[in-house]
Image: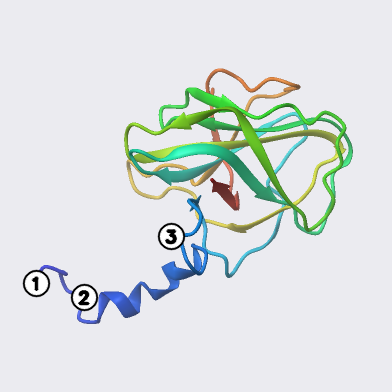
Amino acid sequence: MTLLGTFKGNPRNDLGYFNTVGRPDPEVVFHRANLPRVGLDDVAALTSGVMTTAALYLQDGDLVSNLTAISAGTAAGSPTNWWFALYSGAGALLGQTADQTTAAWAADTAKTLALASSVRITRSGIYYVGIHVAATTVPTLLGCSAARPVLTGEGNLAQTSGSGLTATAPATIATPAVKRQVPLVIAT
């Protein structure tokens, strides 16, 4: 047994796909993403009036000012409220973007929204990015399908919470339910 356990290959070669998570030069613009840029598809991650949160690893010292999600093949139809929010790993609200009310969100469009106040991360770990859209037709999002937690202690990669939400993000992620459709989220 070695430091790498029973793995016999070159870790750099085996983990090369991680390079697709970042931009070609990650030194140019700070960002954190929860999924690689390849293998993504159109996923039905949203339900009107319900918040979907996606797990995102952030590092101590990160300064998060903006959150981004990307619509896929379906645009938002007649939205009444939509916003993004950042939550701690324990589910406490850290920041929210302005409510976009009836602003359009077209298909295949990245939306980057500024948090009301930037959030300095003081502890490395899992955080959650919340996406909420109340609309006649919610947009589909660029993302992937993932397995539910299998092992004791595994967290949800995506989850839903709340109902009948409008302009304000809930103070906590209450009673989360696992969601197999994981949207791509980016913090900058």
On the picture, is 108 further left or further right than 32?
right
Q: Position of residue 172 (x, y in %)?
A: 52, 21
Residue 186 vertical placement versus 35 (above, below):
above
Q: Nearer the viewer, mark 3 or mark 2?
A: 3
* Residue toward you, 147 or 131: 131
Q: Residue at x 55, y 17 (%)?
A: 171
Please provide percent x and percent y for residue 34. 50, 52
- The amino acid type found where label 3 is placed reads Glu
Residue 27 is marked as: 3
Q: Nearer the viewer, residue 179 or 4?
A: 4
Q: Is 175 drawn above or below residue 53 in the view shown?
A: above
Q: Rate crowding at label 1 as few (under 14), some (14 to 19) or many (20 or more) other CA atoms within 10 Å.
A: few
Q: According to the image, label 1 marks what residue?
A: 2
Q: Amino acid at mark 1?
A: Thr
Gap between marks 2 and 1 measured at Cα: 8 Å
Please, what secondary structure does the residue beneath circle 2 have? loop
- Badge 2: few (under 14), some or many (20 or more) residues near its Cα, within 10 Å? few
Give the amino acid at mark 2: Phe
Q: Is residue 61 left or right of residue 91?
A: left
